[in-house]
Amino acid sequence: LRYPNEKTGSEGWTAFMKITAQEILKKEFDRKMKGYSPIEVDQFLDEIIASMEEGEKEYKAGLSALQTQVDGLISEKAALEAQIDELK
């Protein structure tokens, strides 16, 4: 897995994941006589998709929260630099 960095922006989650929920949803398999139950496989893939979508939401929420913190720290730094300039 590749971990996203500041350069990936909103595409960070897809850069992080090697496969998307859409790719899982669209994947089709050949049917064999004594293969796995298609219904069970579909149900399991649906669970994986739901988990991936929830993970993506959590990732984006966390990324947004971190960006808010960064913005606040940048503002705080600017205010402190202005105070230092005043004291000079």
Image: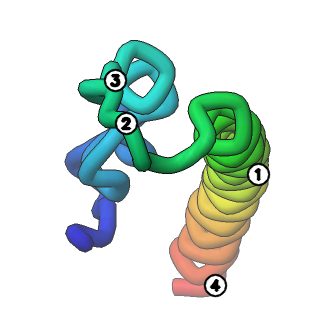
> Of the numbered discs in the image, which one, if any, rests on residue 58?
1
Q: Residue 11: x percent and y percent?
A: 34, 33
First-in-chain label (2 vs 4)? 2
SS at mark 1?
helix
Q: Residue 79: x percent and y percent?
A: 69, 63
> Of the numbered discs in the image, which one, if any, rests on residue 33?
2
SS at mark 2?
loop
Residue flagged by tag 3: what amino acid is it?
Answer: Lys
Alpha-carbon span between mark 2 and mark 3: 19 Å
Q: Which residue is mark 4?
A: 87
Alpha-carbon span between mark 1 and mark 4: 43 Å
First-in-chain label (1 vs 4)? 1
Residue 20 picture quarter: top left
Alpha-carbon span between mark 1 and mark 2: 40 Å
Comparing marks 2 and 3, which lies closer to the viewer?
2
Q: Residue 28: x percent and y percent?
A: 33, 20
First-in-chain label (2 vs 3)? 3
Residue at x 25% of width, y 72% of height: 1
First-in-chain label (1 vs 2)? 2
Q: Residue 85: x percent and y percent?
A: 53, 73
* Circle 2/circle 4 CB separation < 8 Å: no
* Circle 3/circle 1 CB separation < 8 Å: no
> Of the numbered discs in the image, which one, if any, rests on residue 27?
3
Name the residue furthest top. 26
Residue 88 vertical placement versus 63 (above, below) = below
SS at mark 4?
helix
Comparing marks 3 and 1, which lies closer to the viewer?
3
Alpha-carbon span between mark 3 and mark 1: 25 Å
